[in-house]
Image (tube, rainbow, N blue to C red):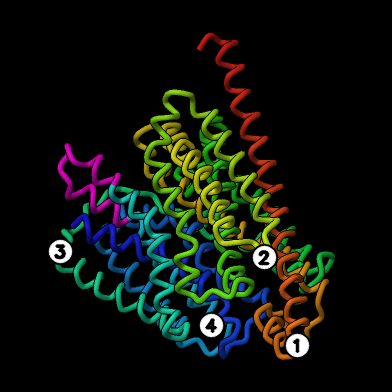
Amino acid sequence: MTALMVSCVVIVVAMVAAINLAIPALEAGRLHPSSTEMLWVVDAYVLVFGCLLIPAGAAGDRFGRKGALLTGLAVFAVGCLLSAAAPSIGVLVGGRALTGLGAALVMPATLSLLLQVTPRERKGQAVATWTAGTGAAGVVGNVGGGVVLEYLTWPWLFVSVALLITVLGLLTAWVAPRGERHSAALDPGGSAMLVAMVFALLFGIIEGPSRGWGSATVLGAFAVAIAVTAAFVRHGLRRGAPVLDPRVLTIPSLRIGVLGVAVTFFGLFALFFVNAQYLQYVKGYSPLVTGVAILPVAVTVTVVSRRSLVVAGRVGADRIVTVGLALVVVALGLLSLVGAGTPYLAYAGILVVAGTGLGLCLPALSTSIMVSLPARQAGMGSGLNGAAREIGSALGVAVLGTVMTSVFADRITTADGGSIERTLHAAAQVSPGAHAAAIDDFSAAMSAGYRVVGAVVLAAALAIGWGYRQRASRSIEFGE
């Protein structure tokens, strides 16, 4: 049962990493997406996944966890098949969003069912195994996706995942017990507002370069995001059981944890998004080699995170989080300096620095969220942690991708809708010198993106450090 539940969650999380490897193949394929459309292909999944984690968990509690899991697996498989057969970018984005809905149903249900069948004395081990599976999913997504894309076209990435999910669904229907049901309030209005709020913000960021930052559409998107945020807060304060009670964000330790988790995944998935493009476009690696080449960051995060809470207990969570975020900022700064001539060993060393920083701060930040709430709100804490992670990831991809698109478009003129892959391919057909110049333009755009992402992480790190100091001063003042 443990292996089955962990396998389900590994697949849905691995898909977040695998899609980044497919970006060059998608841009070169039959759908011919622009760089802006490619951002929507990546972000549609994590947008729906992150925003619906909390209500999906509540739906599983109310209607049955096994049913929620089987429904999620079915929806996930259908979304993958729709993505594989998509005749247009709009349908592909819709398929990705549908897959994100399935993932939101799967993730909380797997942990709930696992804990239901695990004896009390082994629950801690079960949670640790499940958590380790989510961490290993990045490795699975990169290596597994690399293998598929090395030998097959991009639609087969979605088809192969759909087949795996179907097998897991059949095994779940056979092996898993009927899930317990508990009274859990649903908040469809609040859930819809949460999705609309994040979607409007992403729309403004992603569409800004192509539509114009001062256009009515983009400014309207940002205005809608602000208005829906205000309505969401008002709804949460008035409703008895909202999808997210905004009052919990007044708890300093929880607020620090949410901001920290969001910003670390903001930086991590910005890195994942551009890494596959850099290694394939600039270094000329194959998809499989690219998938293996990103392993230093994933392995380092896994290894360091196992010991980070022990270290935090000795030196304090504030110090380990501060050091971790500082290392992430340093890594992003170093990544802004890489180019075509950077040796892989030097690049891998930077990935290790990034992985060390992430491994140090993420467990302490997630723990800060969970321990800030009473036991009866543990589900909300877990959902909030997951939502912060996925929404931070979506924003990281959107911001870095938008900066890259803007800078690349300013440096090189194309007539093909702004696709980076097609621009580089066209330059290669002209002459080796033209291709080298286009590669330099891509590297400059990537560097600009990393600098902006690094500045955001730095600003958040300073805010988190200030929050820790405020907590410490209050503790001294009140003798806590």
Instruction: Residue under label 3, please give it.
Output: 175
Instruction: Residue under label 1, please give it.
Output: 431
Figure quadrant of residue 202: bottom right
- Left or right side of 463 for 50: left
- Residue 147 tag number: none
Disc 3/disc 4 C-alpha distance (Å): 34 Å
When the figure is inspected, residue 166 is found, relative to residue 213, above or below; the finding is below
* Residues in magenta, as a range: 109-128
Instruction: Residue under label 4, please give it.
Output: 91
The residue under label 3 is which amino acid type?
A: Val
Q: Nearer the viewer, mark 3 or mark 1?
A: 1
Q: Where is residue 262 in the image (x, y as percent from the top left)?
A: 56, 48
Instruction: Residue under label 2, please give it.
Output: 341
Q: Position of residue 127 (x, y in %)?
A: 29, 45
Label 2 close to label 3 by CB (< 8 Å): no
Q: Local crowd at mark 1 within 10 Å, few (<14), some, or many (≥20)?
A: few
Label 1 close to label 2 by CB (< 8 Å): no
